[in-house]
Image (tube, grey):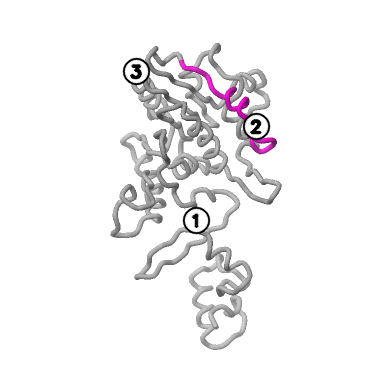
Amino acid sequence: MLRDAPPCGRRGTPLLRLINDDRCKRLGAYARTDRVLAGPDDFGAARVLADSTVVQVPIGGTRIRLVDRRLVGGDWQRQPASAAPLPARFAFASLKGGVGRSTALAVVAADLATQGLRVLAIDLDIEAPGLGPMLLNDDSLPKFGVLDALVENGLAGLDERFLADLIGPSMLANRRGRIDVIPVLGRRSLRHPADVLAKIARAYAEDVGDNGSVATFLDQVRSLVDSFAKSNRYDAILVDARAGLHETTASSLMGLGAEVFVFGRDEPQTFQGFRVLLAHLARFVDAGGPPPDRRRSGWRG
């Protein structure tokens, strides 16, 4: 009966009219004019019910499945990835730039290298790259960067030779350890700087496969990181995330199964941002349940 509820302002049984009048009053301009209630047998419902990535919100002993379909920002709605296997992954994030996030990553990389470990540092702050210039010089800068990888992945995929051309050795490492860096901009981009803004626009686009599969920015970043993690060449992977709550920041915080360090200054802007971020992440945690790092999912964020 609820499934057949008429649109706002349409006729129906007294009960259905009551339900819809209340719905329209509460939602106002956000109320759909077509049917908004559907049953499990309706077209498309089975796919939604089988989707394991939707957010499940406990309300009064009942779990409500929150399905949010959007053109942008969809990666924030995905379940946080479980803790990734070795090598250890660490994501460095912040709600604004200039708070020492990239510097802290460089210090950690240097310290790990001093202990004789092999470190891979990846810059994912595409619109404000800083890790490459900090850890590399003109001689060690690789041919390509993260920006090229995201663009080329949507065209022809990435082979081993291309992946090798993404890495530059950092002079920050001593003789005991090793620091490899994947910057945002490689030599090719810096030789043709007028093309960089166009590349950034293409890098954010979804990758649609021949079979109709869709790889979002998160999927592509995770695939790139996984490619280097599986090589067994590194003891730790450090990721410099994009500052702020941009859609692409979700790839580092939600998609890599990494330990996440969030940096900020003692100022109102920082705490406002934390409030937004933590309120969103709270949707993935049962109220009164164990903290995320103790759940069977293994997610640590």
Going 33% across and 37% down the picture, which residue do you hit?
Answer: 267
Going 55% across and 27% down the picture, which residue do you hit?
Answer: 184
Range covered by the magenta-colored residues: 151-170
In the image, what residue type sits under mark 3? Thr
SS for callout 1: loop
Query: Hey, which quadrant is residue 12 in on the image?
Result: bottom right
Going 65% across and 32% down the picture, which residue do you hit?
Answer: 199
- Residue 238: horizontal and vertical position, in percent? 43, 30
Residue 24 magenta-highlighted? no
- In the rendered view of the protein, which quadrant contains the C terminus? top left
Query: Is residue 90 something one can see in this rendering?
Result: no
Disc 3 target residue: 114
Disc 1 target residue: 53
Going 34% across and 59% down the picture, which residue do you hit?
Answer: 286
How many C-alpha atoms fall within 10 Å of the one at disc 1: few (<14), some, or many (≥20)?
A: some
- Residue 159: horizontal and vertical position, in percent? 63, 30
- Residue 234: horizontal and vertical position, in percent? 44, 27
In the image, what residue type sits under mark 2? Lys
Question: Is residue 178 shown left or right of residue 203?
Answer: left
In the image, what residue type sits under mark 1? Thr
Viewer-side residue, 102 vs 151 = 151
Disc 2 target residue: 199
Q: In terms of sequence position, does the residue under pointer 2 or pointer 3 come before the other?
A: 3
- In the rendered view of the protein, which quadrant contains the N terminus? bottom right
Question: Mark 1–mark 2 contact, CB under 8 Å?
Answer: no
- Residue 193: horizontal and vertical position, in percent? 64, 22
Vertically, is 151 above or below 114? below
Distance in Å between CA atoms under marks 3 and 1: 40 Å
SS for callout 2: helix
Q: In terms of sequence position, does the residue under pointer 3 or pointer 1 come before the other?
A: 1
